[in-house]
Amino acid sequence: MISLRKDLLDRVIAKTSYQGFQPEKYKDLYLPLKWNRDELYDLVSKRIGQLFREQYTRKPVTYEDVFSETVGSQNSIDFMLDRTLMRPRDIIYFVNQCISISLGKSKITAQTIRDSEISYSKDRLDSLSYEWGADYPLFHIYTNILRRKSSVFTHSDISREMIDELSIELILNEAHSNDPVRKWAISYYEKSEFSRSTFLNKLLSVLYKIGIIGVKKDSHSSVVWYQDNDLTISESEFKRSSFIHIHPLVWRELGVMPTTPNYKKKKRS
């Protein structure tokens, strides 16, 4: 039995290129491991109970005993889970950040959670850059296309000047000539293969796969996130009428401006 991150498995499959190889034949051997909100809440609550039992008291301690009930109009645990990719490592790091700046205080307040989000968001974006560095070594550069954007945007919100500026920055980074987005930037800038729309769609498909954007294809569909269902979306599916949603995980680090009151996901029961 082997435990392997999904992106690493995809990399192995992509590099297995012998004639006749059929990846779908191996799917029955996989057991996808996913966490839901209730499971992540239980994990956090148990860790908090163990931590405070060991250091401060023998009485049972729950999440609600330590954390503010709400952040704004939202339940605080949902606020934090909204800013994760539904992985234990994310919510554990967020909780630890909150605890570390609240030492000596009896309660972790809503303001503390918001303050912790600043360093949390930066760290998680850095972590994603590390995780995906083998496939996309210039990931930290092309996330700049999302800086100071509204949390929901469309094709028309990305101007030609923005695409040109990003392309030049990627092209000048010759140390990572194998980065696929850099190669697309060269093709776009040379006007040999890609139009502005084609280059942007290819870039968005990468950001979607990494998990920091979701796609709402039209007004009748819901937002699709790769980490929710592993559904691959090709660049041709990023239509001009599509709405691109930036994940709250990176809002603070990228200076994203929220345009909706809450991140639309099913809340804990």
Image: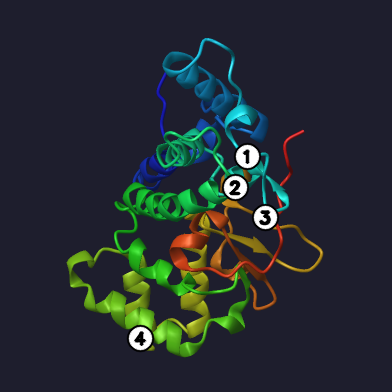
Q: Relative to the observer, which residue lies in front, 257 or 163? A: 257
- The mark that comes first in sequence, 4 or 2, is 2
Expressed as whole percent of the image width and height from the top left, the position of residue 136 reads 34, 58
Is the residue 175 above or below the residue 87 in the image?
Answer: below
Q: Quadrant of residue 54?
A: top left
Rendered-image quadrant of the N terminus: top left
Residue at the left extreme of this rendering: 175
User: Nearer the viewer's eye, disc 3 or disc 1?
Assistant: 1
Dot 3 or dot 4: first in sequence order is: 4
Seen from the viewer's position, the closer of residues 251 and 182 is 251
Sequence-wise first label, 3 or 1? 1
Q: Tell me, yes or no, whether the two marked residues, 4 and 1, touch with CB atoms within 8 Å.
A: no
State the SS at label 1: loop
Discs 2, 1 touching: Cβ within 8 Å: yes
- Regarding residue 187, the answer to whether it shows in the image is no
Query: Circle 1 is placed at which residue position?
Result: 68
Mark closer to the observer (3, 4): 3
The residues tagged by marks 2 and 1 sit, at their Cα atoms, a distance apart of: 6 Å
Distance, label 4 to label 1, CA atoms, is: 50 Å
Mark 3–mark 4 Cα distance, whole angstroms, equals 35 Å
Residue most extreme to the top: 58
Q: Amino acid at mark 1?
A: Ser
As drawn, the label of residue 110 is 2
Please say if 35 is above or below 187: above
Which colour style is shown?
rainbow
